[in-house]
Image (cartoon, rainbow, N blue to C red):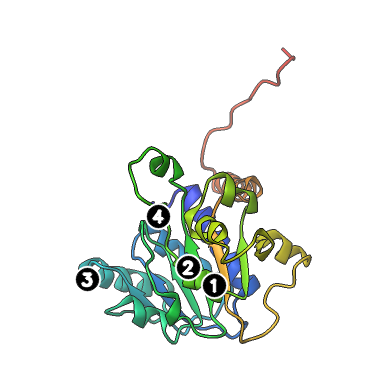
């Protein structure tokens, strides 16, 4: 959905990652996907970078065209449909995949030095273990992981706990180790330096929501609703009191 709190949270976390890890002069964006999650990605990057152009690829051409028209009207920036995932990736400063794909949406061989890459993925390990799917859901291929100089996730523990295929499979194959995976929080706090040169490929595996992000967003929603006189105040009894 375009407007659920969870959708906003996921989009906003991508924006935080772009702000922390994309080159400061990043202005060309490649976007894979044309649904509600993709719309929230555009709003997020619009908040943290001066957008020169966004190239959008999705498999359904009608959706792609309508999405570009709607979003360019909304933010007043150049948002153009392209005919392939490769065209969206090549020449972009930031590459964002926002799909519900079960298979990689782009080839890591297309990536270029200096790019920041984002995938958004949920775990479906239960479906794999139950025999319903051959492999876990992932938008990235192994080559993307192999080429990334910096890999960050929202919640490192979830990669193994939920067997999130995009990083879990490369871990199991020895392409990366646990030490190669850093939390976005450690970059924000300065514990990890993040991007240290304009030539690095940085990769944000936007893997899980965090309670802190949900609470921050809930507070904003609450404050805005109260400022506008929306909603109904109710008294919630404190346990142990009358």
Q: Earlier in the sequence, mark 1 or mark 3?
A: 3
The CA distance from mark 2 to mark 3 is 28 Å
Query: Callout 4: helix, strand or loop?
Result: loop
Reading the chain from its start, which is encountered first: label 1 or label 4?
4
The local crowd at label 4, few if under 14, some if 14 to 19, many if 20 or more residues have their Cα within 10 Å, is some
> Percent position (x, y) of residue 188?
72, 65
- On the image, the x and y values in percent for residue 14 come to 54, 64
Residue at far right of view: 191
Relative vertical location of residue 111 with respect to residue 19 in this rendering, above or below:
below
Q: CA distance from mark 4 to mark 2?
A: 30 Å
Query: Residue, x 44% and y 67% (percent of image)?
Result: 141
Q: Nearer the viewer, mark 1 or mark 4?
A: 1
Q: Under tag 2, what secondary structure?
A: helix
- Let me know if residue 37 appears in the view: yes
Q: Nearer the viewer, mark 4 or mark 3?
A: 3
Whether label 1 touches label 2, CB < 8 Å = yes
Name the side, left or right, on which 1 lies relative to 173. left
Between the C-alphas of marks 4 and 3, the distance is: 20 Å
Taking the spot 54% from the left edge, 72% from the top edge, the residue there is 146
* Disc assigned to residue 2: 4
Residue 125 quadrant = top left
**Residue 61, numbered label:** 3
Q: Are marks 1 and 4 in contact (CB under 8 Å)?
A: no
Residue in the picture at 26% in, 68% down: 59
Residue designated by label 2: 142
Q: Which residue is mark 1?
A: 146
Determine whether label 4 and label 2 are within 8 Å by CB: no
Label 1 element class = helix
Earlier along the polypeptide chain: callout 4 or callout 2?
A: 4
The quarter of the image holding the C terminus is top right
Who comes first in sequence, dot 2 or dot 3? Answer: 3
Single out the mark in the foreground, 2 or 3: 2
């Amino acid at each position: 959905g375009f407007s659920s709190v969870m959708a906003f949270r996921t989009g906003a976390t991508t924006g935080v990652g772009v702000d922390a890890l994309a080159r400061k002069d990043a202005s060309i964006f490649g976007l894979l996907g044309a649904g509600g999650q993709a719309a929230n990605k555009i709003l997020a990057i619009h908040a943290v970078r001066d957008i020169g152009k966004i190239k959008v690829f999705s498999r359904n051409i009608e959706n792609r065209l309508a999405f570009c028209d709607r979003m360019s009207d909304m933010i007043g920036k150049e948002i153009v449909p392209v005919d392939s995932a490769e065209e969206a990736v090549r020449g972009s400063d930031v590459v964002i995949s926002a799909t519900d794909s079960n298979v990689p949406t782009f080839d890591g061989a297309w990536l270029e030095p200096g790019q920041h890459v984002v995938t958004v993925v949920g775990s479906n390990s239960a479906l794999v273990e139950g025999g319903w799917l051959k492999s876990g859901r992932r938008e990235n291929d192994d080559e993307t992981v192999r080429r990334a100089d910096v890999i960050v996730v929202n919640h490192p523990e979830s990669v193994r706990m939920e067997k999130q295929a995009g990083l879990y499979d490369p871990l199991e194959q020895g392409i990366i180790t646990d030490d190669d995976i850093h939390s976005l929080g450690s970059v924000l706090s300065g514990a990890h330096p993040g991007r240290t040169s304009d030539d690095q490929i940085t990769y944000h595996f936007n893997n899980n929501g965090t309670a802190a992000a949900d609470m921050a967003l809930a507070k904003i929603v609450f404050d805005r609703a109260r400022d506008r006189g929306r909603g109904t105040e109710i008294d919630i009894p404190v346990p142990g009191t009358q």
